[in-house]
Image (cartoon, rainbow, N blue to C red):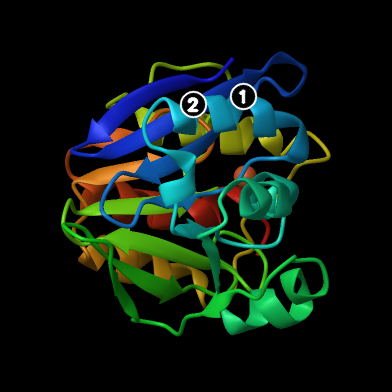
Amino acid sequence: MSSVYEIAPDIFRISTFVPEANLQFNQFLIRDEQPLLYHTGQNALFPAVRAAVESLIDIHTLRWIGFSHNEADENGALNHWLDAAPHATALSGLLAAVTGINDNISRPPRILEDGDQLCLGRHIVRFLVTPYVPHSWESTLLFDETESTLFCSDLLLQRGNPAPVDEAVLDAAIHDLQEGQQTPFRDPIPCTPHTQPTLMRLAALRPRCLAIMHGASYQGHGDAVLAEYAAALPRILAP
Ligand SMILES: [Fe+2]
Ligand SMILES: [Fe+2]
């Protein structure tokens, strides 16, 4: 069973807590003339996430499906979604397409480049190519310019089952990053020459809402949160 919460006007957070992982898996739906789902969730989550999406829109109107990088929680259930939503097209960067989904996807994605904008109706989203942020080289992110909402993927991951929105996401994320260094899940965000400039580029967008894949979303001064996160990463992660 997934829960639904509106984190910004017509931007909905769909959240499923998986106790075995002590982690929430969140997808986000932008409800507009051309609805967009960001993150598909894994195959196992598809029935629950589909039910949540159907509570918000007619699934046949779903137009776009976005994701950050090639991992199961990002785009694992992509073909289920393409089957269920016959008018939907996946959005992908070139690298994610040629290194992953082109080999598995049931119909071709639309390839976007850095800075490309897409008008969904009232919402305009901008595609951001963000190599190695949050981790792999094909990583991209998405920014809703209309509602100043940044879809952060794995950035600011918080463990547990927090409320949909929390003002303390930064403290929780830094704590969990430090704790994670003692586990096999250490160094989830590689510290590369791209890390700081990319995070500061995201901060410069001055997002009012951070739509985070694992854990609570944030409403407020997203630029300050991202800048502090950028400053903290080199102190915690291996160089
Ligand atoms: Fe990831
Ligand atoms: Fe993730």
Q: Return the mark for residue 34.
A: none
Q: Return the mark for residue 48.
A: 1
Give 128 or 125, whichever is nearer the viewer.
Answer: 125
Q: SS class of the residue under badge 2? A: helix
C-alpha gap between disc 1 and disc 2: 6 Å
For disc 2, does the CB lie below 8 Å from ligand 2?
Answer: no
Name the quarter where the N terminus is drawn.
top right
Q: Residue at x 43, y 58 (%)?
A: 63
Q: Quadrant of residue 9?
A: top left
Q: Is 217 placed left or right of 24 in the picture?
A: left
Q: Mark 1 packing: few (<14 Cα in 10 Å), some, or many (20+)? A: some
Q: Image height check: is 167 above or below 125?
A: above
Q: Is residue 159 visible?
A: no
Q: Residue at x 30, y 35 (%)?
A: 218
Amino acid tagged 1: Ala
For disc 1, does the CB lie below 8 Å from ligand 2?
Answer: no
Quick check: which quadrant has ligand 2? top right
Give 169 or 105, whichever is nearer the viewer.
Answer: 105
Instruction: List x then y, in percent, for residue 220.
Output: 17, 38
Q: Residue at x 49, y 73 (%)?
A: 130
**Cβ atoms at labels 1 and 2 below 8 Å apart:** yes
Q: Return the mark for residue 52.
A: 2
Q: Mark 2 packing: few (<14 Cα in 10 Å), some, or many (20+)? A: many
Q: Image height check: is 117 above or below 28?
A: below
Q: Residue at x 18, y 44 (%)?
A: 221
Instruction: List x then y, in percent, for residue 68.
Output: 55, 60
Amino acid tagged 2: Ala
Instruction: List x then y, in percent, for residue 154.
Output: 55, 48
Instruction: List x then y, in percent, for residue 83.
Output: 67, 51
Q: Is residue 56 visible?
A: yes
Give 36 or 23, whichever is nearer the viewer.
Answer: 36
